[in-house]
């Protein structure tokens, strides 16, 4: 820490810092004292992001929902809060409310996050078919295609449909070429299909991006062991 302070000082010693002292942090207002639903959402989000020790983000989301029960972002935030605590059925109710609002005028909403989060909750509950439909709906929105197609590919792998899973994981990689989990999953699929040369090529390409991709390293170990036994 002292070294960082030293370098900061050396880099700024020629500056006049007398007017650059930032304002001290201000305590959050009580939820009832915040004027807008958006303000309540943003305050709750800030508290969650910084894991505030004395303020509860849900107090702000719930106040927002008392004023606007169908608000998309606050319903989605409450759904996430319950899902992270394992209250999956309760989380889905909030995601459904957000989806109802988003699709009230347009069946393909501009934001697929509530659909994606609902898919996660359903998947955790073992409701694979319902989760599959929700993930696919989330993929209508480009922002969620990376994660959405990856989760869809996982479900198809669990059902043994490797061809479909390969197509979906490729779609995930089109949206995010550096998705390390998707790269790992694709190597698994290629190995199970017997496409060893293609699997090894993807392993080397992936390790060139991230040498600490443990899933890829494990797949390299599995394939190297198979070669060793074949050669013995």
Image (cartoon, rainbow, N blue to C red):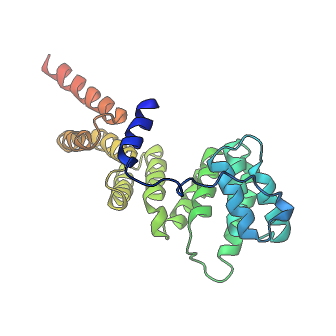
Residue in front for this viewpoint, 159 or 152 = 152
Name which quarter of the figure residue 107 lies in: bottom right
Q: Which residue lies furthest to the bottom in this view?
A: 105
| Residue under the image location 70 percent in, 74 percent down | 101
On the image, which quarter does residue 105 sit in? bottom right
Q: In this view, does 199 lie to the left or right of 110?
A: left
**Residue under the point 18% across and 25% down:** 227
Q: Where is residue 92 in the image (x, y as percent from the top left)?
A: 71, 56
**Residue 196 percent across, percent down from the top left:** 21, 39
From where the camera sits, is residue 40 visible? yes
* Residue 205, percent from left and from top: 21, 44
Task: Indicate whether 218 appears above or below 65.
Answer: above
Q: Is residue 144 left or right of residue 36?
A: left
197 horizontally vs 145: left or right: left
Count the numbered circles shown: 0
In this rendering, does residue 71 appear at all? no
Q: Is residue 127 left or right of residue 18?
A: right
């Amino acid at each position: 820490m002292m070294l960082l302070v030293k370098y900061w000082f050396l880099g700024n010693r020629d500056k006049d810092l007398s007017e650059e002292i930032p304002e001290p942090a201000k305590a959050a207002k009580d939820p009832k004292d915040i004027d807008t639903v958006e303000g309540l959402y943003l305050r709750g989000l800030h508290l969650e992001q910084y894991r505030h020790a004395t303020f509860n983000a849900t107090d702000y989301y719930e106040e927002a929902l008392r004023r606007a029960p169908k608000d998309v972002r606050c319903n989605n935030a409450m759904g996430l809060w319950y899902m992270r605590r394992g209250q999956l059925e309760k989380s889905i109710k909030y995601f459904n409310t957000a989806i109802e609002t988003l699709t009230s005028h347009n069946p393909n909403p501009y934001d697929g996050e509530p659909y994606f989060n609902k898919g996660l909750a359903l998947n955790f509950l073992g409701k694979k078919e319902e989760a599959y439909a929700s993930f696919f709906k989330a993929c209508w929105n480009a922002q969620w295609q990376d994660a959405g197609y990856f989760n869809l590919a996982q479900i198809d792998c669990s059902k043994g449909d490797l061809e479909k899973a390969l197509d979906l994981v490729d779609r995930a990689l089109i949206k995010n070429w550096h998705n390390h989990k998707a790269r790992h999953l694709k190597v698994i699929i290629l190995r199970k299909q017997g496409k060893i040369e293609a699997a090894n090529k993807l392993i080397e390409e992936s390790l060139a991006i991230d040498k600490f991709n443990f899933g890829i390293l494990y797949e390299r170990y599995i394939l190297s062991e198979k070669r060793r036994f074949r050669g013995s």
